[in-house]
Image (spheres, helix red, strand yellow):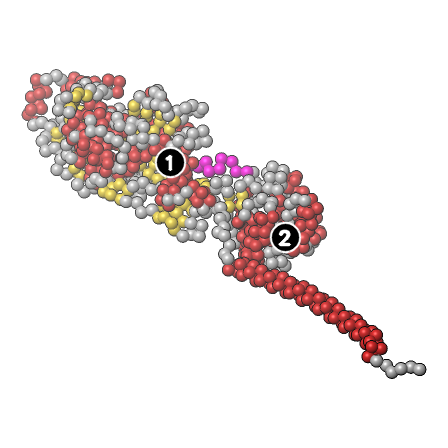
C-alpha cells in the first residue's frame, strides 16, 4: 500500500527541471555573447574603413589644395643674350653654351608639332599631366628589374623636369615631377604647355628650342620646316649626340623613319606620305665656324660694360636673354680688321690695335684689340703701358695755343738744347730722331710736320706742364701724367682708347662726347634696362680745334712724317705719328672719324724702322675704306679764326717785299702777327750787302 507523497519525494524532479532551465539559459546567454562579439568586430572594421576613407578623402583634398594654392617654383630658362651692331646685325650670342630663341607656337611648323606629339606623348591632349597607364607599365618594369629602368614620362612631365628638376632617376624626383606636371596642367592650357616644351627641349650642339635648332640644322626658321625636316628634328631629343645629323646622318635618318612611322600610326600622315618622305634627302647646314669672330675684342668690352651698368653676374649676362644694341658699324669693323690683317706680317708676333670713334656722337665704330683673338684675348686698345711718343704733342700744342703761349708764328731754334726745371735743380736733354736738327729757327707748322722734339719741349717750358695735364684731363685722358718737361714727348703711357677719345674732341670742333659702346640694353620681354646718355662737353673753342687741325694736316706734306701715305688718302685728314723704341702710333681724324692705331710687341721688344712704318698705312687704308661711302669734308674755319699770310722764315706778316716764304696760317683772333716781315728799303739793303739771292735760296733749302 502506497503512502502519501512528501516534498522530499519531488526534489529530484525539481532539480532536473532546474538543470534543464539552467542549460537553456546558458545556451541563450552563449548565443547572445557570440552575437555581441560578432557585432563588435563588424563595428570595428566599419570604423577602420570609415577612418581610412576619411583620411584618403582628406589627403586627396589636401593634395588638391596644395596643387591649387602652392605656386610652382621659379623656373629658370636660359636664353641667349644677343649683342647687335648699330644696324641690328648679330655680332655675338652670349650663350654660356646655350643657344636658345623663344618663339610662339604659331611660329612653329605644324609638322614639327605633330611629329613631337606622336613621338613623345601620343595621349598628350587626353591626360591631365600624368599618363596612368604609362606609369603602371613603368612601375611594373622597375619592380621586375629592381631598379629605375623605365621612364614613361608625359610631355608635361618632361617639361616639368627640364624647368624645375634634375635628370636623376629617383622615386623622389618622380614624385616631384608628377606634382609639377599636375600643377602645370592646372596653370596652363595644353597649347601653352606645348609651346613651352618646344622652346625648352634640347636638340644638341648647344641648341635649345625648335627655333634655334631649325636655324642650326637647316638654316631656316621653325615655321618653315617641311615634314622631312620636322621628323628628323623631332627624333633628335631622344639622343642629341647619337642622332645628330651633323655627326651621324645615317642614324638621324633611321630615327626620322621611326618618327614617320609613329606619325602614320597616330594617323597624322598616310602610309604613302610616310614612305615618300623617308626617301627624301634632307639638306643639313654645316656647323657654323668662327662663330662671333667679327669684333671679338669689342664683344668682350661690351660684356664688361653690361655687367657694370646692370650690376649683374655672368650667368644673367650669358643666359638672361638680354638684347644689347651697340654702336659698332660692322662694315667699318671689317675694314679695320682687314687693314691690320694686310699690314701685319703673317705668323709673326708683331701686334696692333685700332679703335675708331665718331666725334659727333662718341659712338665707337670699330675696335681691334690684337691680331688674333683666338690666340690672345688681351685687348690692347685699353693697354695703359705704352708711351704715345710724339702723338701726344697735339695735346701739348692745344694747351699752348689755348693759353696763347704760342701761335702758328712762334719760332724756336731746332738744335741740341738743355732745359732746366725744378728751380734749376734738374736738367733735361731731349734729342730729335736720329739727331736731325734744323739748326735754326722753325715755326709751329714745321715743328709738327717734322715732329721736332726741341720745339715741343720749348713749348711746354713756356706753357707749363700743369696746363698740359689740365688739357689732357679735359680731353678724357685719365692715365698718370707727371708735370715734367718730358711730358711734351709722350713719355707717360696712355691707351689707344684714350688717344682716340682725345683726338675726337679736335675732330668735333672742340666738343668731346664720352665714348659710347652700348646704346641700350633690353631684357627678354623688351623692357629697357639701360639707355645711353653720353655726356657731351665743349672742352675747347671751335676756333682752337680748327687752328690745331689745320696745323696737323701738314704731316702729310712733303717732308712730313706721314708723307709716305699721303697718296692713300683722298680726303682732308689731320693726324700725328708717334714712335718710341718699342711703339709705333698713328692717331688722326676727319670730320667723321677719329682713329688711333698702335703697333708693337706685347713684351716691349724693340721694333724695327720698317715695323714702325706699318702704323700709318693701317690708318690710311682703314680710313679710306671706312669712309668710302662718305664724301670728303674739309675742316671749315669757324668764327674766331683769322687766316693770314706769314713769312715762314721770320714768323712775321708777309708782304710783297718777302714773297718767297709766304704761307697762309690760321690764328685765334687777336693772336695773329701785326708786324710785317721787313720794310722794303731794309730788304733791298740786305740784298745789296749780303750774298746773292740764289745763294740764300740754297742755304734755306739746305737747312730745311
Going by the image, does 624 lie left or right of 3? left
| Residue 307 seen in render | yes
Judged from this view, the residue extending furthest toward the right is 1
Going by the image, does 323 lie left or right of 30? left
**How far apart, in angstroms, are the residues tagged by discs 2 and 1?**
51 Å
The answer to which of marks 2 and 1 sits earlier in the sequence is 2
Q: In the image, what residue occupies the spot 20% across and 19% down?
A: 429
Label 1 Cα crowd, 10 Å radius (few <14 / some 14-19 / many 20+): many
In the rendered image, the vertical position of residue 93 relative to residue 60, given as above or below: above
Q: Is 14 inside the magenta-drawn segment?
A: no
Give the quarter of the figure containing the C terminus: top left
Mark 1 element type: strand
- Residue 366's image quarter? top left
Q: Tell me which secondary structure the magenta stretch mostly adopts.
A: loop
Mark 2 and mark 1 residues within 8 Å of each other at the beta carbon: no
Q: Is 288 inside the magenta-drawn segment?
A: yes
Q: Residue 534 location, x and y as percent?
A: 30, 45
Label 2 Cα crowd, 10 Å radius (few <14 / some 14-19 / many 20+): some
Mark 2 element type: loop
Could you say which is closer to the camera, residue 297 or residue 544? 297
Could you say which is closer to the camera, residue 292 or residue 628? 292
Find the magenta span and give its range.
287-295
Q: In the image, what residue occupies the spot 63% across and 53% down?
A: 121
Circle 2 residue: 121
Going by the image, does 274 lie left or right of 358? right
Q: In the image, what residue occupies the spot 42% across and 36% down?
A: 296
**Residue 367 tag number:** 1
Q: Residue 40 location, x and y as percent?
A: 68, 66
Q: Residue 454 location, x and y as percent?
A: 20, 23
Going by the image, does 245 lie left or right of 387? right
Amino acid at each position: 500500500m502506497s503512502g502519501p507523497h512528501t516534498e522530499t519525494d519531488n526534489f529530484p524532479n525539481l532539480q532536473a527541471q532546474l538543470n534543464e532551465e539552467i542549460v537553456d539559459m546558458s545556451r541563450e546567454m552563449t548565443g547572445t555573447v557570440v552575437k555581441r562579439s560578432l557585432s563588435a568586430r563588424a563595428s570595428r572594421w566599419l570604423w577602420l574603413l570609415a577612418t581610412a576613407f576619411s583620411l584618403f578623402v582628406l589627403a586627396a583634398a589636401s593634395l588638391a589644395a596644395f596643387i591649387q594654392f602652392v605656386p610652382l617654383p621659379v623656373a629658370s630658362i636660359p636664353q641667349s643674350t644677343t649683342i647687335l651692331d648699330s644696324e641690328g646685325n648679330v655680332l655675338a650670342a652670349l650663350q654660356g653654351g646655350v643657344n636658345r630663341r623663344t618663339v610662339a607656337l604659331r611660329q612653329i611648323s605644324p609638322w614639327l608639332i605633330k611629329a613631337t606629339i606622336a613621338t613623345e606623348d601620343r595621349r598628350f591632349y587626353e591626360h591631365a599631366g600624368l599618363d596612368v597607364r604609362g606609369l603602371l607599365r613603368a612601375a611594373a618594369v622597375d619592380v621586375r628589374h629592381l631598379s629605375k629602368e623605365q621612364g614613361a614620362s608625359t610631355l608635361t612631365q618632361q617639361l616639368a623636369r627640364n624647368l624645375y628638376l634634375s635628370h636623376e632617376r629617383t622615386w623622389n624626383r618622380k614624385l616631384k615631377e608628377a606634382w609639377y606636371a599636375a600643377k602645370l596642367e592646372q596653370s596652363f592650357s595644353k597649347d601653352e604647355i606645348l609651346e613651352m616644351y618646344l622652346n625648352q627641349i634640347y636638340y644638341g650642339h648647344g641648341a635649345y628650342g625648335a627655333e634655334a635648332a631649325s636655324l642650326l640644322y637647316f638654316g631656316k626658321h621653325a615655321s618653315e620646316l617641311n615634314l622631312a625636316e620636322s621628323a628628323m628634328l623631332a627624333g633628335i631629343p631622344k639622343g642629341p649626340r647619337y642622332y645628330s645629323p651633323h655627326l651621324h646622318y645615317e642614324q638621324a635618318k633611321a630615327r626620322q623613319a621611326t618618327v614617320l612611322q609613329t606619325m602614320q600610326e597616330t594617323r597624322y600622315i598616310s602610309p604613302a606620305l610616310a614612305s615618300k618622305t623617308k626617301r627624301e634627302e634632307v639638306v643639313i647646314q654645316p656647323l657654323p665656324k668662327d662663330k662671333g669672330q667679327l669684333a671679338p675684342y669689342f664683344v668682350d668690352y661690351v660684356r664688361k660694360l653690361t655687367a657694370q651698368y646692370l650690376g649683374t653676374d655672368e650667368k644673367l649676362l650669358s643666359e638672361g636673354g638680354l638684347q644689347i644694341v651697340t654702336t659698332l658699324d660692322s662694315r667699318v669693323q671689317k675694314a679695320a680688321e682687314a687693314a691690320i690683317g694686310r699690314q701685319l706680317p703673317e705668323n709673326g708676333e708683331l701686334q696692333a690695335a685700332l679703335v675708331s670713334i665718331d666725334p659727333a656722337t662718341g659712338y665707337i665704330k670699330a675696335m681691334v684689340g690684337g691680331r688674333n683673338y683666338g690666340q690672345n684675348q688681351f685687348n690692347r686698345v685699353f693697354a695703359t703701358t705704352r708711351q704715345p711718343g710724339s702723338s701726344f704733342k697735339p695735346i701739348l700744342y692745344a694747351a699752348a695755343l689755348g693759353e696763347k703761349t704760342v701761335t702758328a708764328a712762334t719760332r724756336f731754334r731746332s738744335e741740341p738744347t738743355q732745359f732746366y726745371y725744378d728751380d734749376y735743380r734738374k736738367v733735361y736733354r731731349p734729342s730729335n730722331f736720329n739727331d736731325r736738327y734744323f739748326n735754326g729757327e722753325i715755326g709751329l707748322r714745321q715743328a709738327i710736320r717734322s715732329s721736332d722734339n726741341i720745339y715741343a719741349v720749348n713749348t711746354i717750358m713756356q706753357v707749363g706742364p700743369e696746363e698740359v695735364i689740365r688739357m689732357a684731363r679735359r680731353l678724357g685722358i685719365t692715365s698718370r701724367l707727371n708735370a715734367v718737361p718730358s711730358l711734351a714727348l709722350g713719355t707717360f703711357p696712355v691707351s689707344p682708347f684714350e688717344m682716340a677719345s682725345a683726338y675726337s674732341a679736335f675732330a668735333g670742333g672742340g666738343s668731346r662726347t664720352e665714348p659710347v659702346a652700348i646704346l641700350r640694353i633690353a631684357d627678354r620681354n623688351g623692357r629697357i634696362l639701360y639707355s645711353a646718355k653720353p655726356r657731351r662737353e665743349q672742352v675747347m673753342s671751335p676756333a682752337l680745334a680748327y687752328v690745331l687741325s689745320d696745323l696737323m694736316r701738314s704731316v702729310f706734306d712733303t717732308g712730313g712724317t706721314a708723307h709716305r701715305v699721303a697718296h692713300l688718302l683722298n680726303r682732308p685728314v689731320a693726324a700725328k705719328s708717334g714712335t718710341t723704341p718699342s711703339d709705333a702710333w698713328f692717331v688722326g681724324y676727319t670730320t667723321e672719324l677719329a682713329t688711333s692705331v698702335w703697333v708693337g710687341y706685347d713684351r716691349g721688344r724693340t721694333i724695327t724702322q720698317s715695323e714702325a712704318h706699318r702704323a700709318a698705312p693701317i690708318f690710311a687704308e682703314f680710313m679710306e675704306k671706312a669712309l668710302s661711302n662718305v664724301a670728303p669734308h674739309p675742316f671749315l674755319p669757324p668764327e674766331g679764326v683769322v687766316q693770314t699770310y706769314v713769312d715762314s722764315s721770320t714768323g712775321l706778316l708777309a708782304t710783297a717785299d718777302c714773297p718767297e716764304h709766304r704761307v697762309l696760317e690760321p690764328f685765334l683772333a687777336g693772336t695773329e702777327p701785326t708786324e710785317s716781315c721787313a720794310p722794303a728799303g731794309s730788304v733791298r739793303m740786305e740784298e745789296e750787302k749780303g750774298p746773292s739771292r740764289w745763294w740764300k735760296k740754297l742755304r734755306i733749302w739746305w737747312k730745311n
